[in-house]
Image: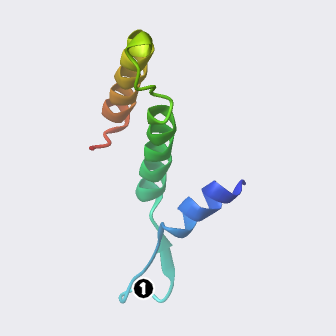
Amino acid sequence: MNERIKELEKQCWQSSQSEPYALFDVNKFAELIVRECISIMGSEIVYNDNYKEKNNAISDMMELLMKHFGVEE
């Protein structure tokens, strides 16, 4: 695994007072990965009118991914 995946994984462990061990939140891990992917796509948007079609395509794909995986903004 690369370092970024390891960092995301660390954010998903939860200790519980009712359980003697830490619990891994699979849903949170999946959401963090989806958000990371959307963030990377967003960094590709160029703020220049010459790239309007590219930006629209990226924005549409970001929205589609968020809807597909049920991730809210």
The picture quadrant where one finds residue 16 is bottom left
Which residue is pictured at 36% across the width and 24% down the height? 59
- The relative height of residue 3 versus residue 19 in the rendered view (above or below) is above
Which residue is pictured at 36% across the width and 87% down the height? 18
- In the picture, the quarter occupied by the N terminus is bottom right
Which residue is pictured at 55% across the width and 69% down the height? 10
The x, y position of residue 43, in whole percent, is: 48, 36
Q: Crowding at label 1, few (<14), some or many (≥20) Cα neighbours within 10 Å?
A: few
- In the picture, the quarter occupied by the C terminus is top left
Q: Exactly how many numbered labels are in the figure? A: 1
Colour scheme: rainbow
Which residue is pictured at 48% across the width and 66% down the height? 12
Q: Residue furthest left?
A: 72
Of the pair 5 and 70, the residue shown nearer to us: 5
Q: Which residue is mark 1?
A: 19
Q: Relative to 9, is 62 on the left or the right?
A: left
Of the pair 6 and 26, the residue shown nearer to us: 6
Of the pair 1 and 22, the residue shown nearer to us: 1
- The relative height of residue 12 versus residue 41 in the rendered view (above or below) is below
Callout 1: SS: loop
Q: Relative to 6, is 16 on the left or the right?
A: left
Question: Type of residue at label 1?
Answer: Glu
- The relative height of residue 60 versus residue 29 in the rendered view (above or below) is above
The x, y position of residue 20, in whole percent, is: 48, 89
